[in-house]
Image (cartoon, helix red, strand yellow):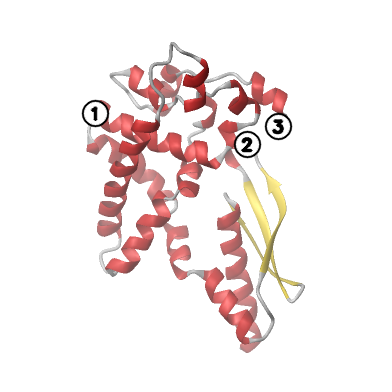
Amino acid sequence: MTSNSNHQRDIESASSLDLRLGLSFSNLSLLTRALTHRSYTNENFDAVEDNERLEFLGDAVLDFVTGEWAYHCFPEMPEGNLTKIRSFLVRNERLAEFARKLDLGNAIRLGRGEKTSGGHLRESVLGSTFEALIGAMYLDSDLNKVKKFVIPLFESVKESLLDELEDAKSELQETSQALKLGTPHYRVINVSGPDHARTYEVEVLIAGEAKGRGTGTSISLAERSAARSALVHFKNLKS
């Protein structure tokens, strides 16, 4: 997508987003504020407030909801791993992934500079806006509504969370160095899909040779998938 097309894209209204996602906000101005980036308020003086305070609140709400979900979802898991699961879910990369699933970027109100440079595709903007949306949802309704909204998103990545917990990249690095093959290097070999639903394909090179490939909705997830593929390669060599 070119800068020009970014600039000309149609912004989805808060009321349209509310209807499309079935959010049922009683106070649409809260939703509008959640979608308002600081760059927009800097250029539009009729916009009273940006979404940064809602982002702060949403961060705290998500921290609690993810902790409670992980506690009930993984009843046998020790505290240290539960902490990792929670951190995997609330980090910006993951929240941006959720925002893309919801096609939230097209509804974010940005200043001209941010809009032209494709701010609605940027992970930092998407993740922060998702947090602001959660903060607004909590203020507009209650914690139960937030849970109903986010838990299906958590469930959709449950398996990949367990994969991340295994920390395949660290295991591959240890394996590679133990075999005196040096440090693994990752490179993106293909990107496909629309702006809001990218799929990345990554190859891992060890001693200059491709040892595994993987795909994911972010480069980080694709790298972990490639690392798992390479570990399978090394385990097959041993057997």
Image quarter hosting the C terminus: bottom right
Q: In the displayed image of the protein, which residue is found farthest to the top?
A: 46
- Going from the N terminus, do you reach mark 1 or mark 2 first? 1
Q: Which residue is mark 3?
A: 1
Q: Residues within 10 Å of mark 1 (few under 14, many from 20)?
A: some
Does residue 174 appear to the left or right of 64 in the view shown? right
Q: Secondary structure at mark 3?
A: loop
Q: Kindly report the distance in space between the C-alpha atoms of the residues bearing marks 3 and 1.
A: 37 Å
- Position in image of residue 154 (x %, y %): 39, 49
Q: Kindly report the distance in space between the C-alpha atoms of the residues bearing marks 3 and 2.
A: 8 Å
Which residue is found at the position 68% from the left and 45% from the top? 192
Q: Which residue is mark 2?
A: 195
Q: In the displayed image of the protein, which residue is found farthest to the right?
A: 208
- Position in image of residue 83 (x %, y %): 33, 61
- Going from the N terminus, do you reach mark 3 or mark 1 first? 3
Amino acid under disc 2: Asp
Q: Are marks 3 and 2 in contact (CB under 8 Å)?
A: yes
Q: Kindly report the distance in space between the C-alpha atoms of the residues bearing marks 1 and 2.
A: 31 Å
- Position in image of residue 230 (x %, y %): 63, 73
Image quarter hosting the N terminus: top right
